[in-house]
Amino acid sequence: MNEQIVIATFYKFTPMTDLPKQQQEMKTFCLEHNIKGSILLAEEGINATVAGSRAGVDDLLAWLRQRPGLADLEHKESFATAVPFQRMKVRLKREIVNMQVPGVSPEEMVGHYVPPEAWNDLISDPEVLLVDTRNDFEVQLGTFQGAINPHTKAFHQFPGYVQQQLDPQKHKKVALFCTGGIRCEKATSYMLGLGFTEVYHLQGGILKYLEMVPASESLWEGECFVFDERVTVNHDLEPGEGELCHACQRPLIDTDRQSDKYIAGVCCPHCHDTLEPERKARFTEQQRQKRAVLS
């Protein structure tokens, strides 16, 4: 029986220095422990999703928590039968989550953390405006009951949505959520700077909620998009039914797969009309060969 793969997601806003050296040290440690995934480093902190054996992931987390500013690093776990990454990447970035608004710092001010066990009560309050901070395609795959979709294509568009659609005088209580919590930390900090006073966010994000709240009590609907080869996870944090378009790499929802312009392993409604004929023919031939091998 193959050993179960542990997938750990973690982030922390904390001052980081000597980034090139830390980049090399982290990549070396991960390679030595057969860990794959992605780690982003910036002066504002660390953001990562990695996968490996139980021992390898535990060793990495213990090693990271010995480093300056990371002693209280929290993480979330899910599991898979295979490593959902092809390689190990450690990248240096200007931000660990790309908001593109200078001066926003969750270290200086941040919204009220709401543990998963208290989240249902909060978002059931009719005075609370519930906003999904994730991108439009993520929201379409799954979200909380009653949540507003800002229809953003990237997180750096979220500040524009807040300025155009939300009013601190009108929206007294706002609750935000995202996949793992990192986007919400920046979003709540940004909103507090605009004069919003009661801003809440789901501690640990959707992934922690799915881990802690039984499906029978859950207000979550659908699946949660994750940034690895699993594409989505269900309420049990198992790989879901999500699929990426072979051509454009866009996550597909049911209506996409029901479209006449969806061809499994070839293209989807979003790229069918723009995909070069040569690529379409190549992907079609690859699918034909796969079916021939399986038949």
Image (spheres, rainbow, N blue to C red):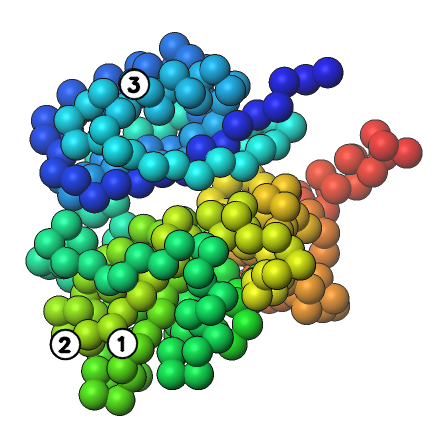
Say left or right for 295 vs 211.
Answer: right
Kind of residue indicated by mark 3:
Trp
Q: Secondary structure at mark 2?
A: loop
Residue 143: x %, y % from top left:
53, 65
Kind of residue indicated by mark 1:
Val
- How far is mark 2 from mark 1, CA to CA? 12 Å
Q: Nearer the viewer, mark 3 or mark 1?
A: 3
Residue 160: x %, y % from top left:
25, 74
CA neighbours of label 2 inside 10 A, class few (<14), some (14 to 19), many (20+): few
Query: Pointer 2: what residue?
Result: 195
Query: Pointer 3: what residue?
Result: 63
Rendered image: mark on residue 162: 1
CB under 8 Å between callouts 3 and 1?
A: no
Q: Earlier in the sequence, mark 2 or mark 3?
A: 3
Q: Earlier in the sequence, mark 2 or mark 1?
A: 1
Kind of residue indicated by mark 2:
Gly
Residue under the image location 39 percent in, 49 percent down: 204
